[in-house]
């Protein structure tokens, strides 16, 4: 899910922070070496994980059909990861397509809103979603075997 460019950038940022703390910054006092090591690793890990977070957002935005440029700008411009927090709070649900009519819809739908194609198993009495492994409805206790769900939505069956 994290793109390769983000992984490479994270490695480069981590290595760059090590170079800054151990090669560029003066180190006259050797008793400060543990502190310099700790600071170099901490800042390197911070910038590397920020690069990985930006990579994740760049892929997730496309998967959800949102504007990649806008959200990358928000994540980069707002300081300290606030842009990423805003993204996670406001992101759209993942969309899927109906295999029957290709209508785009939220992945949590049980039926297609255009052609009534059954996308997920539901109880025949209360019409709430069930798992394909359920024998009885968890909401009303109805025997799901009596509903004659399509074969593609049945994981286990006593009649086969």
Image (cartoon, rainbow, N blue to C red):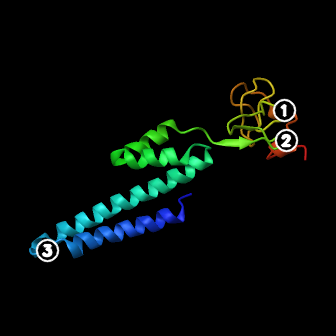
- Is label 3 in a helix, a strand or a loop? loop
Q: Report the Cα–Cα distance between label 1 and label 2.
A: 8 Å
The residue that disc 2 covers is 100
Query: Looking at the rendered structure, which numbered label has been put on residue 14?
Result: none
In this rendering, the answer to whether 124 lies above or below 85 is above
The crowd level at tag 1 (other Cα within 10 Å; few <14, some 14-19, many 20+) is few
The residue that disc 3 covers is 27
Q: Nearer the viewer, residue 157 or 34?
A: 34
Residue 103, x across and y down, in percent: 77, 38
The residue that disc 1 covers is 115
- Is label 1 in a helix, a strand or a loop? loop
Q: How many marks?
A: 3
- Is label 2 in a helix, a strand or a loop? loop
- In terms of sequence position, does the residue under pointer 1 or pointer 2 come before the other? 2
Task: Choose top left, top right, bottom left or bottom right for residue 119.
Answer: top right
- Of all residues, the one furthest to the right in this rendering is 160
The crowd level at tag 3 (other Cα within 10 Å; few <14, some 14-19, many 20+) is few
Q: Write the residue at 83% across / 31% down.
A: 116
């Amino acid at each position: 899910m994290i793109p390769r460019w983000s992984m490479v950038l994270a490695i480069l940022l981590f290595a760059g922070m090590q170079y800054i703390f151990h090669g560029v910054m003066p180190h006259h006092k050797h008793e400060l070496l543990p502190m310099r090591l700790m600071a170099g690793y901490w800042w390197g890990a911070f910038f590397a994980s920020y690069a990985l977070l930006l990579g994740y957002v760049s892929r997730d935005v496309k998967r959800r059909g949102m504007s990649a440029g806008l959200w990358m700008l928000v994540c980069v411009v707002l300081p300290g990861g606030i842009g990423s927090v805003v993204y996670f709070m406001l992101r759209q649900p993942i969309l899927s397509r109906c295999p029957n009519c290709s209508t785009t819809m939220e992945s949590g739908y049980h039926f297609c809103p255009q052609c009534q194609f059954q996308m997920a198993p539901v109880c025949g009495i209360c019409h709430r979603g069930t798992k394909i492994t359920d024998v009885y409805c968890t909401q009303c206790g109805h025997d799901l075997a009596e509903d004659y769900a399509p074969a593609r939505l049945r994981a286990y069956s006593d009649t086969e």
